[in-house]
Image: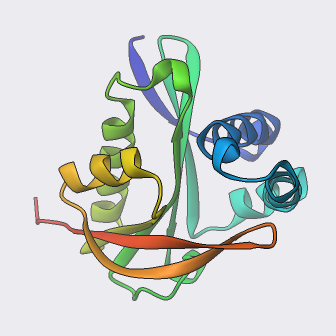
Amino acid sequence: MAVEVKKCTVEEVQKLRSISIETFRDTFEEQNTEEDLCNYLEKAYTIEQLKTELLNQDSEFYFIYDEYDLAGYLKININEAQSETNGEEALEIERIYVLPEFKGKGLGKILIQQAVERAQFHQKTNIWLGVWEHNQAALAFYKKLGFVQTGAHSFFMGEDEQTDLILTKKLTKE
């Protein structure tokens, strides 16, 4: 099997919830209070919220498997599903996470390529995402893949207002 990317279905919502919470905690728990983290997780990753997102025709979720192990996931948005107005030519990568034990294996690049392919399918000319300004590893990863900073916006972790840098990558026609 090696590495496989598969679209996530609403029937897999519990699996999506589990990996969402695990990867979010892994990424952000050391820099945030437990209270803020829990408050965010309790709102963002309920079964009901995730089902709503899965059923939105302008959002897509993908799981990535390494061999047969679920290793990470991707959420992309177009049109009205984007978390911010970035125009009809844009596709948003809202979430992209890989479990710690699978990092360094190139899975993030595969998920970015999945987003690029979906953007091209939907005839989008750029992809964008928000990255916490203190997540240096992610910032370096995206810049290496050709993303450039085009803005910033606020992100609330519980009551704590944080800054996400907006990174954009222009797509070439293939």
Given residues 148 and 92, the one toward you in this image is 148
Question: If the image is split into quadrants, where does the C terminus sit?
Answer: bottom left
The residue sitting at 33% across, 68% down in the picture is 127
Closest to the observer, 33 or 9? 33
Q: Is 55 situated above or below 22?
A: below
Decide which of 136, 124 is in the foreground and name it.
Answer: 136
State the image quarter where residue 88 is shown.
bottom left
The residue located at (27%, 63%) in the rendering is: 120
Lateral position of residue 78 relative to residue 171, left or right: right
Left/right placement of residue 12 relative to residue 31 reads right
Location of the N terminus (image quadrant): top left
Point 11% across, 65% down: residue:
172
Which residue is depicted at the point 54% across and 76% down? 82
Q: Is 157 displayed left or right of 95 in the figure?
A: right
Reply above or below: 107 against 38: above
Q: In the rendered image of this protein, does residue 108 appear above or below residue 170?
A: above
